[in-house]
Amino acid sequence: MATRIAVIGAGAAGATAALQARKFSRDAEITIFNEEKYSQYSRCGLPYTISGKVKDFEDLVLMPPESWASVKIDAKLGTRVTRIEHDAKKLTFEGDESGELQYDALIFATGARNADPPIEGLDKERVYGLRTLDDARVLANEAVAAKRGVVIGGGLVGMETAEAFVERGLEVTVVEFLPNCLLAMVDSDMADIVEEHCRQHGLKILTNTAAQKITGGESPEGVIVKSRQTEEVTEIPADFVVVATGVRPVTDLAESIGVNVGKSRGIVANEKMMTNLENVYAVGDCAESPEFITGTGIVAGLGTVAVRQGRVAGINAAGGDVSFPGTVGAKVTKLFGLEIASTGLTEDTANKWGVPVAKGSIKGSTKPPYFTGGNDLKLKTYYNKETGKLVGGQLVGVEDAAMRLNVLTLGIQQDIDVAELFDFENCYAPAICDTWDPLVQSADAARRRLKM
C-alpha cells in the first residue's frame, strides 16, 4: 500500500483522486500540485461567468485552498512539477514553493492545453482561448468593452462561449471548419436543428468554413475566412477573437519517465487507471482509457468521466482495488434554451470503429398531443445490427432531453437490446409525459427494422 501519494494537477480528476485516497486511507501522506493558484473549480461553468448566469467567479471554486488542510492534504498551488526521477521515486517542484518530494504512488492529472490551429495572427492581443478561470475573467471584460466577436470552432466550448456573448448583446460569428457544429456530439441532421435554433436567436454561424488569418495591428480588426464549398474569401469584422478548436492532453512529464502515450495522444491507462508503470496512474483530460462499447482507447474530455477516473486512481493508489468500466460518453449542453444531449456512438463513430448500426429516429413530443404546452423532441437511438444491443442515442428539444439521455446511458451500461428498451415501463401523467415515451417509440421504430 502506498503511504506517500503525489497528485499532479488539481482539476476535477486530480482533486477527486486526492480526496478519494484520503477517504480510503487516513494514514497516507497526500500532496497535490497545481500550476494555477486556484484549487479545483468547474471548467464547464466558465462560459456562464461571461453571460452572468454564474454571478461570481469564485462561485466556481469547488475546493477552496484552505479546505485542503482540513482533510490533511498538502496542496501546493501556484507550483509546477519540473522533474521526476522515477527510479528514485522523487519529484522536483518550483513556484510559490520549491523543493523535492518522495512518493510511493504518482497520479498524473495534468489535463489538456488548447490546440491552436495554423492561423496567422493568433499572437495578437485580444485573441483568447477559454480554459482557465483567468481566461474567463478577461472574456467577461470583453463582453463589456467589445461590440463584435468571432469564435473559431463550433464544438461545445465554442458554442457555449458564443451563446454567452450573444446574451450580453454582442454581435458574434462562429466559424466552423466541419460541415456542422457539434459533430462530436450529434449527427448532421440533429446539428442542423441546433444551428437553425441558434441563428433564430441572433448567432451567426459559418460552417464548412476555414479561418485563415486574423487581421489588424496589435489587436484584431477582423478574421479572413474561406468557404470550403465555394472557395469564396470574406472578412468578418471583430474586436476580439476566441479560439476554441479543441485541446491536446498534457503528457510531457509522464513521457519523461517512460509512460506510454496512445493514438489519442493521451496517457494510456487500464481499468485500474494505472499506466504501464507500477503505481503510476493517469486520470482526466490527459488520460486515454477504453470506450465502453468497443474498447477503443479515447480521451473523454468530460468532467463526469474525470471524477470517476479520479475516484478509481485515488482509491487504488491508497491500497484499494476498484475499476473504471469505460467511457460511454454522455454529453449535454443547452443553447438558447435548447437541450442537446448525446451518449454512446454517433453514426460517424460507429462507422469509424466498424460497428454496424440500425437506428430508430422519431420526432416526438414531451407531452400527450391533447395536452397544452408540449414541445417537440427529436430523438434517435442506435443499435448494433448484429446483436440488437443499444449503442447510442441523441436528443434535441427544449425540455427533458437530459433526463432521457441518462436512461439511454444506463441502458448502454447494462447491455440492453432494442426489445428490452421497447419493454421499458415509463411513468405517465398528461402534464408531464405520454403513455408511450419517445424513448420507447424510438426503440419500436428500430425494433421493426431489426425484426426483434
Image (cartoon, rainbow, N blue to C red):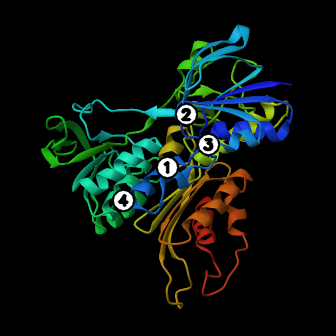
Where residue 418 appears, x then y in whole percent? 67, 60
Residue in the image at 55% along x and 39% along y: 354
Mark 2 residue type: Gly
Q: 10 Å neighbourhood of mark 4: few (<14), some, or many (≥20)? A: many
Where residue 300 appears, x then y in whole percent? 57, 40
Give the quadrant of residue 287.
top right
From the image, tell me which residue sits under label 2.
111
From the image, tell me which residue sits under label 4.
163
From the image, tell me which residue sits under label 1.
347
Q: 10 Å neighbourhood of mark 1: few (<14), some, or many (≥20)? A: some
Disc 1/disc 2 C-alpha distance (Å): 28 Å
Mark 3 residue type: Ala
Q: Secondary structure at mark 4?
A: helix
Q: Is residue 290 above or below residue 201?
A: above
Residue 74 left/right relative to 159: right
Q: 10 Å neighbourhood of mark 2: few (<14), some, or many (≥20)? A: many
Which numbered disc, 1 or 2, marks the residue that appears first in the sequence? 2
Disc 4/disc 1 C-alpha distance (Å): 27 Å
Mark 1 residue type: Glu
